[in-house]
Image (cartoon, rainbow, N blue to C red):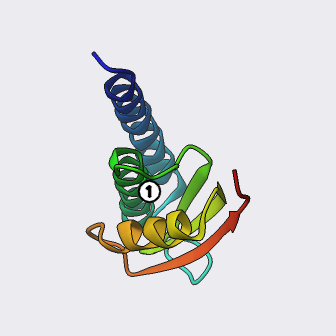
């Protein structure tokens, strides 16, 4: 098993555990949605989108995604962190936009250079 396969498997397990915890928290918190709070279903959807974007970035060839953070809220995705080139920054945004369920992407990634 390659190191990338081990990382991918670890992230998948971590994602599933986070999704289970998020589901339980959402069920206990109620179902109301407001402009600043997601409903239980929206919270779960955001967790799934976050996981899909993280996996897509991790699996992208020739992309330094190790220092990219992903957050989602009601279909909007925010990318932050650091990459070595403008090309990596732009590529991360394109990859995130291509993920199913993503409605918008805010790219706050900083180019740090090598």
Q: Residue at x 57, y 65 (%)?
A: 79
Q: Quick check: 76 left or right of 2?
A: right
Give the structural element (helix, strand or loop) at label 1. Answer: helix
The answer to which of 88 and 41 lies nearer the viewer is: 88
Q: Which residue is mark 1?
A: 50
Local crowd at mark 1 within 10 Å, few (<14), some, or many (≥20)? Answer: many
Q: Quick check: 10 left or right of 69?
A: left
| Residue 110 sits in quarter | bottom right
Identify the residue at the far top of this view: 1
**Count of labels shown?**
1
Q: Residue at x 45, y 52 (%)?
A: 63
The x and y percentages for residue 72 are 51, 65
Q: Quick check: 89 left or right of 103?
A: right
Identify the residue at the far front of this view: 114
Residue 39 seen anywhere in this rendered image of the structure: no
Q: Give the vertical position of 114 relative to 75 (above or below).
A: above
Identify the residue at the far right of this view: 112
Q: Quick check: 1 left or right of 10?
A: left
The x and y percentages for residue 9 are 33, 27
């Amino acid at each position: 098993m390659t190191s990338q396969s081990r990382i991918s498997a670890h992230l998948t397990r971590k994602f599933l555990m986070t999704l289970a915890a998020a589901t339980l928290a959402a069920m206990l918190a109620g179902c109301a949605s407001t402009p600043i709070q997601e409903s239980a279903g929206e919270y779960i959807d955001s967790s799934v989108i976050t996981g899909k974007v993280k996996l897509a970035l991790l699996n992208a060839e020739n992309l330094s995604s190790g220092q990219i953070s992903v957050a989602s809220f009601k279909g909007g995705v925010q990318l932050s962190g650091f990459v070595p080139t403008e090309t990596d920054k732009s590529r991360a945004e394109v990859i995130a936009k291509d993920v199913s369920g993503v409605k918008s992407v805010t790219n706050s990634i900083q180019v740090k250079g090598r």
